[in-house]
Amino acid sequence: FAPTPDHIEPNPGIVRVIEQLARGPTIRVTILTGRRLGHIRQLMPLSGIFLAGTYGIELLTPTDETIHRVQYDDIRPVLEAIKPQWEQMIYGRSGFFLEDKGWTLALHARFAEAEEAQQILSQAQQCADTNLFTESFRILGGHQFLEIAPLLASKGGTVSFLLSEYPLADARLLCIGDDDKDEEAFSVIHARGGTAVKVIQPSQALRPTQADFFFESPLETLQWLEELISQAFR
Protein backbone atom coordinates (compact mmCIF):
# COMPACT_ATOMS: atom_id res chain seq x y z
CA PHE A 1 0.00 0.00 0.00
CA ALA A 2 1.25 3.46 -0.90
CA PRO A 3 1.28 6.30 1.67
CA THR A 4 -1.71 7.82 -0.16
CA PRO A 5 -3.82 6.73 -3.16
CA ASP A 6 -2.28 9.61 -5.12
CA HIS A 7 1.09 7.85 -5.08
CA ILE A 8 1.52 6.36 -8.58
CA GLU A 9 4.28 3.82 -9.21
CA PRO A 10 3.77 1.32 -12.05
CA ASN A 11 5.19 -2.17 -11.50
CA PRO A 12 6.96 -3.23 -14.72
CA GLY A 13 6.59 -6.93 -13.92
CA ILE A 14 2.83 -6.67 -13.50
CA VAL A 15 2.46 -4.51 -16.60
CA ARG A 16 4.40 -7.12 -18.59
CA VAL A 17 2.18 -9.97 -17.43
CA ILE A 18 -1.04 -8.11 -18.21
CA GLU A 19 0.33 -7.12 -21.61
CA GLN A 20 1.12 -10.76 -22.38
CA LEU A 21 -2.37 -11.84 -21.32
CA ALA A 22 -3.94 -9.17 -23.50
CA ARG A 23 -2.09 -10.51 -26.53
CA GLY A 24 -3.90 -13.83 -26.28
CA PRO A 25 -6.47 -14.07 -29.08
CA THR A 26 -8.91 -15.95 -26.84
CA ILE A 27 -8.43 -13.87 -23.68
CA ARG A 28 -10.16 -10.63 -22.76
CA VAL A 29 -8.64 -8.70 -19.88
CA THR A 30 -10.52 -6.25 -17.68
CA ILE A 31 -9.05 -4.35 -14.74
CA LEU A 32 -11.80 -3.11 -12.43
CA THR A 33 -10.73 -0.93 -9.53
CA GLY A 34 -11.85 1.70 -7.07
CA ARG A 35 -9.01 3.92 -8.23
CA ARG A 36 -9.69 6.76 -10.61
CA LEU A 37 -9.40 5.94 -14.30
CA GLY A 38 -6.56 8.44 -14.61
CA HIS A 39 -4.63 6.58 -11.91
CA ILE A 40 -5.12 3.13 -13.38
CA ARG A 41 -4.09 4.37 -16.83
CA GLN A 42 -0.77 5.46 -15.31
CA LEU A 43 -0.36 2.19 -13.42
CA MET A 44 -1.32 0.11 -16.46
CA PRO A 45 -0.21 2.03 -19.58
CA LEU A 46 -1.54 -0.54 -22.05
CA SER A 47 -3.98 -0.65 -24.93
CA GLY A 48 -6.28 -3.48 -25.94
CA ILE A 49 -7.84 -4.08 -22.51
CA PHE A 50 -10.82 -2.77 -20.56
CA LEU A 51 -9.94 -0.35 -17.76
CA ALA A 52 -12.77 0.38 -15.34
CA GLY A 53 -12.05 3.09 -12.79
CA THR A 54 -14.03 4.27 -9.76
CA TYR A 55 -15.75 0.86 -9.54
CA GLY A 56 -16.77 1.08 -13.18
CA ILE A 57 -18.22 4.58 -13.37
CA GLU A 58 -15.38 5.49 -15.73
CA LEU A 59 -14.56 3.04 -18.52
CA LEU A 60 -11.88 2.88 -21.19
CA THR A 61 -12.53 0.27 -23.87
CA PRO A 62 -9.89 -1.64 -25.86
CA THR A 63 -10.59 0.75 -28.74
CA ASP A 64 -9.78 3.75 -26.50
CA GLU A 65 -13.39 4.88 -26.14
CA THR A 66 -14.08 6.59 -22.82
CA ILE A 67 -17.48 5.96 -21.22
CA HIS A 68 -18.91 7.77 -18.20
CA ARG A 69 -21.87 5.84 -16.79
CA VAL A 70 -22.95 8.69 -14.48
CA GLN A 71 -23.48 12.38 -15.21
CA TYR A 72 -20.79 14.22 -13.27
CA ASP A 73 -22.87 17.36 -12.77
CA ASP A 74 -25.67 15.30 -11.22
CA ILE A 75 -23.58 13.92 -8.37
CA ARG A 76 -20.91 16.54 -7.72
CA PRO A 77 -23.04 19.08 -5.77
CA VAL A 78 -23.82 16.48 -3.11
CA LEU A 79 -20.15 15.61 -2.70
CA GLU A 80 -19.23 19.29 -2.51
CA ALA A 81 -21.63 19.68 0.42
CA ILE A 82 -20.02 16.82 2.36
CA LYS A 83 -16.36 17.39 1.50
CA PRO A 84 -15.66 20.43 3.76
CA GLN A 85 -17.33 18.69 6.70
CA TRP A 86 -15.11 15.63 6.31
CA GLU A 87 -12.07 17.86 5.88
CA GLN A 88 -12.87 19.58 9.17
CA MET A 89 -13.22 16.22 10.96
CA ILE A 90 -9.69 15.11 10.07
CA TYR A 91 -7.97 18.50 10.22
CA GLY A 92 -4.79 18.25 12.29
CA ARG A 93 -5.14 14.48 12.80
CA SER A 94 -2.43 12.08 11.66
CA GLY A 95 -3.06 8.91 9.71
CA PHE A 96 -6.11 10.19 7.81
CA PHE A 97 -6.39 11.05 4.13
CA LEU A 98 -9.37 12.43 2.22
CA GLU A 99 -9.33 11.34 -1.41
CA ASP A 100 -11.48 13.29 -3.85
CA LYS A 101 -11.98 11.10 -6.91
CA GLY A 102 -14.32 13.58 -8.56
CA TRP A 103 -17.08 10.99 -8.76
CA THR A 104 -16.69 9.88 -5.13
CA LEU A 105 -15.21 10.96 -1.80
CA ALA A 106 -13.12 8.43 0.11
CA LEU A 107 -11.92 8.81 3.69
CA HIS A 108 -8.86 6.65 4.44
CA ALA A 109 -7.80 5.93 8.01
CA ARG A 110 -5.53 2.92 7.48
CA PHE A 111 -2.57 4.64 9.17
CA ALA A 112 -4.57 6.14 12.06
CA GLU A 113 -4.95 4.64 15.51
CA ALA A 114 -7.79 2.12 15.41
CA GLU A 115 -9.90 3.75 18.15
CA GLU A 116 -9.56 7.22 16.68
CA ALA A 117 -10.24 5.87 13.18
CA GLN A 118 -13.46 4.23 14.34
CA GLN A 119 -14.61 7.43 16.03
CA ILE A 120 -13.93 9.67 13.02
CA LEU A 121 -15.38 7.23 10.50
CA SER A 122 -18.53 6.95 12.60
CA GLN A 123 -18.88 10.74 12.58
CA ALA A 124 -18.27 10.80 8.83
CA GLN A 125 -20.94 8.16 8.36
CA GLN A 126 -23.47 10.23 10.32
CA CYS A 127 -22.57 13.29 8.27
CA ALA A 128 -23.10 11.37 5.05
CA ASP A 129 -26.42 9.95 6.22
CA THR A 130 -27.61 13.47 7.01
CA ASN A 131 -26.59 14.92 3.66
CA LEU A 132 -27.51 12.08 1.31
CA PHE A 133 -31.09 13.16 0.73
CA THR A 134 -31.02 11.54 -2.70
CA GLU A 135 -31.28 7.81 -3.43
CA SER A 136 -28.64 8.12 -6.14
CA PHE A 137 -25.75 7.34 -3.76
CA ARG A 138 -24.38 4.48 -1.71
CA ILE A 139 -21.87 4.33 1.13
CA LEU A 140 -18.98 1.88 0.80
CA GLY A 141 -17.15 0.68 3.86
CA GLY A 142 -13.98 -1.28 4.48
CA HIS A 143 -11.03 -1.65 6.84
CA GLN A 144 -10.70 1.86 8.34
CA PHE A 145 -12.25 3.26 5.19
CA LEU A 146 -15.45 5.03 4.13
CA GLU A 147 -16.55 6.21 0.70
CA ILE A 148 -19.56 8.03 -0.73
CA ALA A 149 -20.28 6.99 -4.31
CA PRO A 150 -23.06 6.91 -6.91
CA LEU A 151 -25.22 3.78 -6.92
CA LEU A 152 -23.59 2.59 -10.13
CA ALA A 153 -20.20 2.48 -8.36
CA SER A 154 -20.45 -1.29 -8.01
CA LYS A 155 -18.05 -3.93 -9.26
CA GLY A 156 -20.94 -6.38 -9.58
CA GLY A 157 -23.01 -3.92 -11.56
CA THR A 158 -20.05 -3.09 -13.76
CA VAL A 159 -19.34 -6.74 -14.56
CA SER A 160 -23.01 -7.15 -15.52
CA PHE A 161 -22.80 -4.03 -17.70
CA LEU A 162 -19.67 -5.21 -19.51
CA LEU A 163 -21.05 -8.69 -20.15
CA SER A 164 -24.27 -7.17 -21.47
CA GLU A 165 -22.72 -4.48 -23.66
CA TYR A 166 -19.71 -6.53 -24.76
CA PRO A 167 -20.97 -10.14 -24.67
CA LEU A 168 -18.59 -13.08 -24.61
CA ALA A 169 -20.28 -16.12 -26.11
CA ASP A 170 -19.26 -19.37 -24.37
CA ALA A 171 -16.56 -17.60 -22.39
CA ARG A 172 -15.12 -19.03 -19.18
CA LEU A 173 -15.20 -16.16 -16.69
CA LEU A 174 -12.49 -15.75 -14.06
CA CYS A 175 -12.56 -12.98 -11.47
CA ILE A 176 -9.67 -12.33 -9.07
CA GLY A 177 -10.18 -9.88 -6.20
CA ASP A 178 -9.09 -9.19 -2.64
CA ASP A 179 -11.82 -7.35 -0.72
CA ASP A 180 -15.53 -6.95 -0.02
CA LYS A 181 -16.05 -4.78 -3.12
CA ASP A 182 -14.93 -7.74 -5.23
CA GLU A 183 -17.47 -10.00 -3.53
CA GLU A 184 -20.17 -8.09 -5.44
CA ALA A 185 -18.46 -9.10 -8.67
CA PHE A 186 -18.10 -12.71 -7.47
CA SER A 187 -21.91 -13.00 -7.27
CA VAL A 188 -22.30 -11.96 -10.90
CA ILE A 189 -19.46 -14.23 -12.04
CA HIS A 190 -21.08 -17.20 -10.31
CA ALA A 191 -24.46 -16.41 -11.86
CA ARG A 192 -22.74 -16.70 -15.26
CA GLY A 193 -21.06 -19.98 -14.38
CA GLY A 194 -17.65 -18.44 -13.74
CA THR A 195 -14.97 -18.86 -11.09
CA ALA A 196 -14.04 -16.46 -8.27
CA VAL A 197 -10.59 -16.31 -6.69
CA LYS A 198 -9.78 -14.40 -3.49
CA VAL A 199 -6.34 -12.98 -2.75
CA ILE A 200 -6.02 -13.17 1.02
CA GLN A 201 -5.15 -10.02 2.93
CA PRO A 202 -5.21 -9.76 6.76
CA SER A 203 -8.17 -7.38 7.02
CA GLN A 204 -10.33 -9.75 4.92
CA ALA A 205 -9.09 -13.14 6.14
CA LEU A 206 -11.95 -13.85 8.55
CA ARG A 207 -14.77 -12.35 6.49
CA PRO A 208 -17.29 -14.54 4.65
CA THR A 209 -16.44 -15.00 1.00
CA GLN A 210 -17.95 -16.49 -2.13
CA ALA A 211 -14.55 -17.36 -3.54
CA ASP A 212 -13.97 -20.80 -5.03
CA PHE A 213 -10.20 -20.71 -4.67
CA PHE A 214 -7.59 -18.64 -2.84
CA PHE A 215 -4.18 -17.10 -3.41
CA GLU A 216 -2.08 -16.41 -0.35
CA SER A 217 -0.51 -13.20 -1.65
CA PRO A 218 -0.25 -10.86 -4.64
CA LEU A 219 3.05 -12.58 -5.50
CA GLU A 220 1.35 -15.98 -5.70
CA THR A 221 -1.32 -14.41 -7.90
CA LEU A 222 1.31 -13.06 -10.26
CA GLN A 223 3.08 -16.40 -10.41
CA TRP A 224 -0.19 -18.16 -11.27
CA LEU A 225 -0.89 -15.67 -14.07
CA GLU A 226 2.60 -16.28 -15.46
CA GLU A 227 1.90 -20.02 -15.42
CA LEU A 228 -1.41 -19.43 -17.18
CA ILE A 229 0.41 -17.51 -19.90
CA SER A 230 2.99 -20.27 -20.34
CA GLN A 231 0.24 -22.90 -20.67
CA ALA A 232 -2.13 -20.89 -22.85
CA PHE A 233 0.45 -19.67 -25.34
CA ARG A 234 2.34 -22.89 -25.98
Image (tube, rainbow, N blue to C red):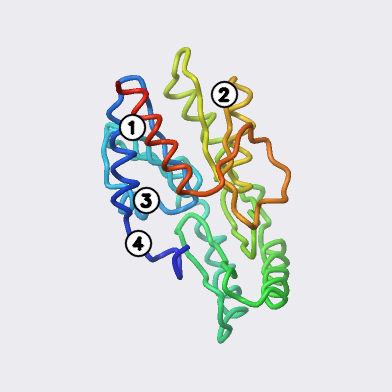
For the residues bearing labels 1 and 3, Cβ distance under 8 angstroms: no
For the residues bearing labels 4 and 3, Cβ distance under 8 angstroms: no
The residue carrying mark 3 is 40
Q: Residue at x 52, y 38 (%)?
A: 176
The residue carrying mark 4 is 8
Question: Which is more N-terminal, label 3 or label 4?
Answer: 4
Question: Which is more N-terminal, label 3 or label 1?
Answer: 1
Question: Which is more N-terminal, label 3 or label 2?
Answer: 3
The residue carrying mark 2 is 194
Q: In what quadrant of the picture does the C terminus appear?
A: top left
Question: Which is more N-terminal, label 4 or label 2?
Answer: 4
Question: Which is more N-terminal, label 4 or label 1?
Answer: 4
Give the residue type that dot 4 points to: Ile
The residue carrying mark 1 is 21
Kindly state the secondary structure of the residue where label 2 is placed.
Answer: loop
**How busy is the neighbourhood of tag 4: few (under 14 within 10 Å), some, or many (20 plus)?**
few
Q: Residue at x 47, y 42 (%)?
A: 221
State the image coordinates of residue 75 (x, y, percent, origin top left). 52, 53
**How busy is the neighbourhood of tag 3: few (under 14 within 10 Å), some, or many (20 plus)?**
many
Q: Is 28 placed above or below 180 here?
A: above
- Measure the C-alpha gap from mark 2 to mark 4: 32 Å
The image quadrant that residue 114 belongs to is bottom right
- Measure the C-alpha gap from mark 2 to mark 3: 25 Å
- Foreground pick, 191 / 133: 191
User: For this view, does 167 lie left or right of residue 93?
Assistant: left
Question: Which is more N-terminal, label 2 or label 1?
Answer: 1
Q: Residue at x 64, y 60 (%)?
A: 143
The image quadrant that residue 211 belongs to is top right
State the image coordinates of residue 132 (x, y, percent, origin top left). 66, 58
